[in-house]
C-alpha cells in the first residue's frame, strides 16, 4: 500500500478532479478499499479495487475514491489510464491502471448493479463495503465496450456500449464515478432516481447506483455512508442548450420558442420533484438561514473581487428585504441549473443533467429543500453568460437584446406552465425551434399581461400553496440572480479568471 500511496501522491494532482490543483501535493491516508470481483475472469487482471483516500493537505479534508485495476504488465494495459507499476510481497509486478479507463472496472460495476451484488472490504475488513442498487425494472444488457467521457471536471464518467440478449443494441449507459465521497446521499442520485421512478422524461432514465460505507475521520462517528457511482442511460449525439443558445445568439436566430419550452420543461421538473419528494414550509428560521448563506456568499465574493465592496450596502438592502418577503414552499430543485446542464434531445425535448448542486456548497446544503427561483435564476444568468461570452470574443455587445428576449420567453414559459395556462404534458418540453404552436403559446403568454419593469408576468409559486404575486415572484428571482452572480464571481475567480467580468458586471447591474 505504501508504494501505491506514493504513486497516487504524484498522479492525483494531475487529475482534473483533484480539488487541490496541480500545485498542491496531497497528504494521503488510506481509509480502506472495497474490492470488486473480476467479471468473467477477465484475462490478465490481478485485482479490481477501490481505495478510499483521505487527503489532509487542504483547509478542508477531502475523501476521494480512486478505483484502480492491477493488471499483468503486458500490451493489454490501456495506455490512457496507466498510472505506474508496483510489486506485491511475492514479487509479482502489476501495472496500475486508473479504473475508469479499464474495461475490467466497468464490467465489474455493471455486474454489481445487475445482480444487486456487493463488494466487501479488502483484507476481510467489515468497515467498508459497496452495494449495487438497480432501479426496479432497469435493463442493463451485456457489456460491449467502454470509454471515458472527456472534458469532465469533478467526476469521471464511463460510457458503456451495451447489447440486449437478442444481439441488438441496448441503450448505452453512463457510469458517473463520484471522485469525492460525502457522508449522505448525493442529490444526483436522489433526484434523478426520483424523477425516473415518477416516469419523467426530463432526465435520462436512471439505471441504478453503487452505494456503501467507509471509515471517515471527518464524521463524529468515524463512519460515513453515501453514493459511489450513479448509472443512467447515455443519450448519444446530442447538444447541450449552451451550444444551441450560443449558436442562435451568434447568428441572431430567434431563441424565443426554445427558451419558452425550456421554461415549461423546468416547471415540469419542479412540479414532479415537489410531487414525489418532501417539501417544507418556508418558515422564518428557514428563510433566515437561506439569507444568511447569501450574506456569506457576498463576503466570499468580495474577498475575491474587492471592487464589489462598494456595492455591499446595496446587496445588504436586497437581503434585508428578502428576509421579509413571501417565499414559496421549499422543495428539492436542481440546484446548479444552467444551459450546459440541459440537453436538446430530438423527439423528447429538453432533458436535464447533473443534479449534484453547486460544487461550492456543502452536501447538507445541496440536500436541503430550496426555492425553485434558484433554478429560474440559474437559467437567466446563463442567457447573460451567452451575451457576455460573445461580447468577450467580438468586443461588442452583440447579443444583449437576444438575451433579454430569451429571458422573457423563458419566464413566460415557466409562468404559463405553473399557472396552468399551457397544458404541460409529457411532451410540452419538445424543442419546437420553428414550432408554430409553441410560438402561439409564447405570444399568448406575452400578450394580455400586466408585466412591470421586471418583465415577470405571472405568479410563479410552484408549491400549490398561496401563490406569490407577480411582483413577489420577480423580487425573489432578483434576489436569487444576485446570489447566483456572486456564486459565479467566486467560481470564475478560481476556475476561469478571464470570465470573471461577466458575473461582476451582472452584480453591478442587478444592484444598480
Ligand atoms: N446521460 C447523459 N447523456 C448524454 N450526455 C451526458 C449524459 N450525462 C452526462 N453527459 C455529458 O457529460 C457532460 C458532463 O456531465 P455532468 O453530469 O454535467 O458531469 P460533471 O458533474 O462532472 O460536470 C454533460 O455536459 C453532457 O455533455
Ligand atoms: O461544472 P458544473 O456544470 O457543475 O457547473 C460549474 O461550471 C459552470 C461552467 O462550466 C458554471 O456555469 C457558469 O458558466 C456557464 C458557461 O460556461 C454559464 O452557462 C452558467 O450560467 C454560469 O453559471 C457553473 O456556475 C458552475 O457551478
Image: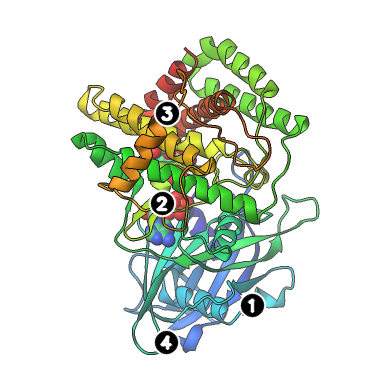
Which residue is depicted at the point 26% across and 30% down?
390
Q: Is residue 216 left or right of residue 48?
A: right
Q: Tell me the element at label 2.
A: loop
- Residue 266 seen in the current view: yes
- Residue 83 seen in the current view: no
Residue holding disc 4: 43
Q: Is residue 144 left or right of residue 224?
A: left
N-terminal of the pair, mark 4 or mark 1, is: 4
**Marks 4 and 1, how far apart at CA:** 22 Å
Residue holding disc 2: 429
Percent of width and height locating residue 329: 68, 39
Q: In the figure, 122 relative to 319: above or below?
A: below
Residue holding disc 1: 118
**Marks 2 and 3, how far apart at CA:** 23 Å
Eye-nearest disc, 4 or 3: 3
- Residues marked 3 and 1 touching at CB (< 8 Å): no
N-terminal of the pair, mark 2 or mark 4, is: 4
Q: Mark 4 and ligand 1: say if the CB distance to the nearest ligand atom is below 8 Å.
A: no
Amino acid at each position: 500500500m505504501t508504494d501505491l500511496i506514493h504513486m497516487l501522491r504524484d498522479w492525483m494532482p494531475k487529475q482534473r478532479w483533484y480539488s487541490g490543483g496541480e500545485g498542491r501535493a496531497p497528504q494521503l491516508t488510506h481509509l480502506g478499499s472495497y474490492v470488486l470481483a473480476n467479471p468473467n475472469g477477465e484475462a490478465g487482471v490481478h485485482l479490481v479495487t477501490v481505495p478510499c483516500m483521505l487527503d489532509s493537505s487542504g483547509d478542508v479534508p477531502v475523501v476521494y475514491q480512486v478505483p484502480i485495476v492491477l493488471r499483468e504488465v503486458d500490451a493489454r494495459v490501456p495506455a490512457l489510464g496507466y498510472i505506474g507499476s508496483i510489486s506485491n510481497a511475492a514479487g509479482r509486478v502489476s501495472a496500475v491502471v486508473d479504473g475508469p479507463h479499464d474495461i475490467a472496472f466497468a464490467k465489474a460495476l455493471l455486474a454489481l448493479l445487475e445482480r444487486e451484488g456487493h463488494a466487501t472490504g479488502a483484507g476481510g475488513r467489515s468497515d467498508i463495503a459497496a452495494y449495487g442498487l438497480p432501479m426496479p425494472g432497469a435493463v442493463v444488457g451485456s457489456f460491449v465496450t467502454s470509454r471515458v467521457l472527456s472534458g469532465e471536471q469533478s467526476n469521471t464518467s464511463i460510457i458503456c456500449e451495451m447489447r440486449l440478449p437478442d444481439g441488438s443494441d441496448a441503450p448505452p449507459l453512463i457510469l458517473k464515478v463520484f471522485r469525492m465521497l460525502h457522508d449522505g446521499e448525493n442529490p444526483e442520485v436522489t433526484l434523478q432516481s426520483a424523477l425516473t421512478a415518477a416516469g419523467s422524461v426530463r432526465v435520462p432514465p436512471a439505471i441504478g447506483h453503487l452505494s456503501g460505507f467507509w471509515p471517515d475521520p471527518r464524521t463524529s462517528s468515524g463512519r460515513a455512508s453515501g453514493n459511489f457511482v450513479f448509472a443512467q442511460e447515455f443519450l448519444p449525439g446530442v447538444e447541450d442548450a449552451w451550444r444551441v443558445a450560443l449558436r442562435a445568439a451568434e447568428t441572431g436566430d430567434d431563441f424565443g420558442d426554445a427558451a419558452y419550452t425550456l421554461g415549461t420543461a423546468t416547471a415540469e421538473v419542479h412540479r414532479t420533484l415537489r410531487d414525489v419528494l418532501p417539501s417544507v414550509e418556508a418558515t422564518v428560521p428557514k428563510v433566515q438561514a437561506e439569507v444568511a448563506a447569501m450574506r456569506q456568499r457576498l463576503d466570499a465574493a468580495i474577498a475575491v473581487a474587492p471592487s464589489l465592496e462598494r456595492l455591499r450596502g446595496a446587496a445588504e438592502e436586497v437581503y434585508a428585504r428578502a428576509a421579509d418577503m413571501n417565499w414559496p414552499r421549499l422543495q428539492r430543485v436542481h440546484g446548479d441549473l444552467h444551459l450546459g446542464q440541459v440537453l436538446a434531445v430530438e423527439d423528447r425535448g429538453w432533458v436535464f443533467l447533473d443534479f449534484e448542486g453547486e460544487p461550492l456548497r456543502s452536501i447538507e446544503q445541496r440536500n436541503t429543500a430550496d426555492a425553485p427561483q434558484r433554478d429560474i435564476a440559474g437559467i437567466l444568468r446563463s442567457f447573460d453568460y451567452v451575451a457576455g461570452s460573445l461580447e468577450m470574443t467580438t468586443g461588442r455587445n452583440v447579443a444583449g437584446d437576444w438575451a433579454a428576449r430569451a429571458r422573457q420567453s423563458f419566464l413566460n414559459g415557466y409562468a404559463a406552465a405553473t399557472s396552468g395556462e399551457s397544458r404541460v404534458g409529457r411532451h410540452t418540453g419538445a424543442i419546437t425551434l420553428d414550432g408554430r404552436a409553441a410560438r402561439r403559446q409564447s405570444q399568448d403568454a406575452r400578450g394580455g399581461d400586466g408585466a412591470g419593469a421586471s418583465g415577470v408576468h405571472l405568479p410563479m409559486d410552484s408549491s400549490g400553496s398561496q401563490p406569490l404575486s407577480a411582483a413577489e415572484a420577480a423580487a425573489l428571482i432578483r434576489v436569487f440572480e444576485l446570489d447566483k452572480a456572486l456564486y459565479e464571481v467566486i467560481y470564475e475567480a478560481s476556475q476561469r479568471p478571464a470570465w470573471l467580468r461577466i458575473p461582476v458586471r451582472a452584480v453591478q447591474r442587478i444592484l444598480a
